Amino acid sequence: MSFEIAVLPGDGIGPEVTAAAVAVLKAIGRKHGHAFRFSTHLMGGAAIDATGEPLPAATLDACRRADAILLGAVGGPKWSDPSAKVRPEQGLLALRQELGLYANLRPVRPHPVAMGASPVKPHLLAGVDLLVVRELTGGLYFGEKKRQADRASDLCEYTVHEIERGLRRGFGFARARRGRLASVDKANVLETSRLWRETAIRLGRDEFPDVALEHHLVDSMAMYLISRPRDFDVVVTENLFGDILTDEASLLAGSLGLLPSASLGDGPRGLYEPIHGSAPDIAGRGIANPYATILSAALLLRHSLGLEAEALEIELAVSAALDAGVLTADLAAPGQSVSTQAAADAVLERITQHCQVAELRD
Ligand code: IPM
Ligand code: MG
């Protein structure tokens, strides 16, 4: 099979981690006989520098033509003046909106090696396996913004259609996993949250009676994610709550450097990115953790290209590299860390080793 993958390295450590993930995808493609065609495009601060815009039309066109998009990270101090009219993050928000990527998946399953690196006690982390589904193209992020000298406002608006499609993804994933969905809102205060909760109750009753649905207010959920993370299977919530809760949930995994994400719409095309940012402080030094981007590439194979076995193979290879203690500076004991390249090589070696074993079997 032949697939087009648009690569948007972006800023900071983005180019380093996407290069590692592309190498892994190439190895998987060679091994399984898939032709992955990669094209690289400007995005974020790098695009502002080159063209004045964070998401140039050529980049958006290439993303529309692609089967899937792999993104590194956007942003950095150079472009972070709050009064700037053009910001790298606008490119990311525009891309999500233009491609209709309304469901953001952020799976969190702490690997034993990384547990020691989490500020949460290890006994609370054992057995944690949760998936946050964040609504990605509505709410405060995209509502009307107003600014006067002495006041400002951001409109939080949701239609039933937007809520339903986000919730359906949450219910669907819950059904395919352990059958439990926690819907998070602030229904004691916000009208949009009351609509969210009513819609969740209705969908649960009419379309997903087999899924056990519970509701949590976002403030209590912020506590539960740390005090009893094992109790959750799929968590679904609106855009801003999801932004905040997923950064919090990332603490469970020990390092931001291990967490992938997928942003999906109605069709197979998706955007895949690590949830860590551009980490300008370590950019260009070859020490960034590439595993989150490599795991994002696995999600790309699973959700956009329908290559489940290949996705699993990458996930197992990363897990084996972690088991073997191949750890970048964010996870390793002082003096024990390996480079981005060495971590990527450890994954590649495991993919090729399995390949040789498979070839022997044939
Ligand atoms: C994320 C990021 C983005 C967001 C920023 C960079 C606009 O924090 O993907 O979670 O707020 O959605
Ligand atoms: Mg965020």
Image (cartoon, rainbow, N blue to C red):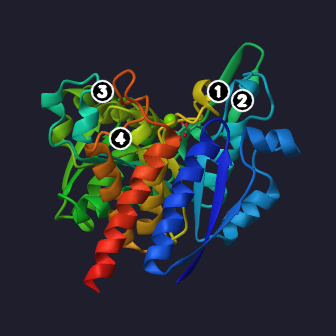
Ranked by sequence position, the earlier of labels 4 and 3 is 3
Q: Which mark is residue 117?
A: 3
Q: Nearer the viewer, mark 3 or mark 1?
A: 3
Which residue in the protein does label 4 denote? 326
Ranked by sequence position, the earlier of labels 3 and 1 is 3
Viewer-nearest residue: 284 or 128: 284
The answer for how far apart the CA atoms under marks 4 and 3 are is: 15 Å
Question: Is disc 4 in contact with disc 2, using a CB cutoff of under 8 Å?
Answer: no
Point out residue 225 in the picture as x, y percentages from the top left corner: 26, 32
Quadrant for the C terminus, please: bottom left
In the figure, is residue 54 to the left or right of 185? Answer: right
Which residue in the protein does label 2 denote? 146
Q: Which mark is residue 153?
A: 1
The answer for how far apart the CA atoms under marks 3 and 1 are is: 39 Å
**Residue name at image x 29 percent, y 80 percent:** 360
Please name the amino acid that badge 3 sits on. Ala
Please name the amino acid that badge 4 sits on. Val
**Residue name at image x 69 percent, y 17 percent:** 151
The answer for how far apart the CA atoms under marks 3 and 2 are is: 42 Å
Residue farthest bottom in this picture? 362
Ranked by sequence position, the earlier of labels 3 and 2 is 3
Ranked by sequence position, the earlier of labels 4 and 2 is 2
Q: Dividing the image into four quarters, tell me where ligand 1 lies.
A: top right
On screen, residue 257 above or below 27: above
Dot 4 falls on a residue whose secondary structure is: loop
The answer for how far apart the CA atoms under marks 2 and 1 are is: 5 Å
